[in-house]
Amino acid sequence: MPKQGRKRKKTRTHVVEDENAASALSTSAPPPPRSLVVRHGSSAAEEPELQDLVADWRNLMSPATALKLKERKGAKVRDYAELAPVLGVTHLMAFSMNEGGNVNCKIARAPTGPTLSFKVKRFSLSKQVRAVQKRPIDTSTSSGIYQTAPVVVTNNFGGADEAAHIKLMRITFQNMFPAVDVGKVRLSDVRRVVLFNLLKDEDEEVEVRHYAVRANPTGVSRSVKRIVQAKVPNLGRVDDIADYVLGNAGASIGAMSDSEGEDDANVVLPQNFVGRGNSKSQKSALKLIELGPRMRVKLMKVERGLAAGDVMYHATIKKTPEEAKRLKAKATEKDALKRQRREEQEANVQRKNAAKEEKRAKKLQRRKEREEEGLNQLRGHALGSEEGYQSE
């Protein structure tokens, strides 16, 4: 029996008649930043604390970073820089340790630079931060806290009238993380905060902190909040659930205080947030719980390229404009000489390849001539034998 019903009408054609609309559809937002956090140097691979610091920073930069990257022994920053365009990496963060035990950090914008070199004054690992906390936050894979990018906060970096190296630090720290669109962001995605605090009174050192955002329902008693958060209370000393909720005699376990979070930021949630009881339009207390790592760094040098190029800023070595101009001219001359040598080398390679091809072509020509000569001789012998047979 034939199929009944009318023919299906095509509805999803996506025909765009307006050129402006077509161009609007074709344009896409810039890709989010991706990073590589590595350690380099011979002594860096042997230091367990530096390995833990690199692992903590990979968690901090999650999810747009390689968590299980294995560094090759003896690899340099330039080796990773060559892989950056292939992998779509925008920022490279390299840790190293010298023979004196000092830790250094380089943050480079791939693939063209600039490169910021920091000296790590002191640091604390995530496990050390969590060890002193009374109630550390859950950071397991099931919690999903590292599945969204953190919100970056730069404090005390000043405005447009600040020094160039301070503005460059602020721009670099901000561009390492995805930009937040306040109108489109989901509140449940704001799980972590990274703080870069410039300490101008302490030799322009930068303090880095990593926090998790925790929200607890407020405006209700502690006993009710435990029930809302699906935490089963101990009712062994009460006769009725009402005694527990109202905090009557014998129910001191739930009547320690009327509400919690008095010192935290109490806000009305515009959207649903992670955690039981944190529903839309509900009042909750927001609190920052430190995750680690904690680090204090000082900017030592800024290079124009990726771990190369002229020095744009140095914390300890100051040069006059004449010296800077002379060094820049020397670097330009050195680059020009290097470019000239490279061109000469390429020309020599081409000349050798051309000579090789010419020699190969002559060899083939001689082989063809010998083959033709041999064929002609065979033809002559064949004709001579045929004439002798006819004469007989």
Image (cartoon, grey):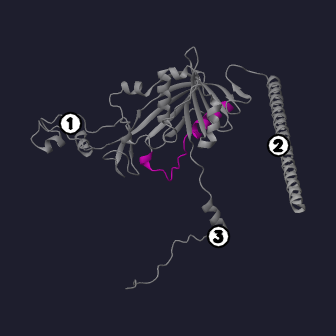
Magenta segment range? 164-189
Left of 26 or right of it: where is 222? left
Classify residue 140 by image quadrant.
top left
Check contact, mark 3 vs mark 1: CB within 8 A.
no
Q: Which mark is residue 255?
A: 1
Where does label 3 land, which residue? 18
The mark nearer the N terminus, 3 or 2, is 3
The mark nearer the N terminus, 3 or 1, is 3
Of residues 67 and 364, which is closer to you in this image?
364
Of residues 371 and 169, which is closer to you in this image?
371
User: In x, y percent, where is residue 385?
Assistant: 86, 56
Of the residues shown, which amino acid type is indicated by label 2?
Arg
User: In x, y percent, where is residue 262?
Assistant: 34, 36
Does residue 86 show up?
yes
Q: CA distance from mark 3 to mark 1?
A: 66 Å
Which residue ends up furthest to the top in the rendered image?
A: 100
Q: CA distance from mark 2 to mark 1?
A: 97 Å
The mark nearer the N terminus, 2 or 1, is 1
Callout 3 environment at 10 Å: few (<14), some (14 to 19), or many (20+)?
few
Residue drawn where x is 47% and y is 35% of the image: 59
Of the residues shown, which amino acid type is indicated by label 1?
Ala
Q: Which mark is residue 360?
A: 2
**Relative to 373, residue 104 above or below:** above
Residue drawn where x is 41% and y is 40% of the image: 145
Check contact, mark 2 vs mark 1: CB within 8 A.
no
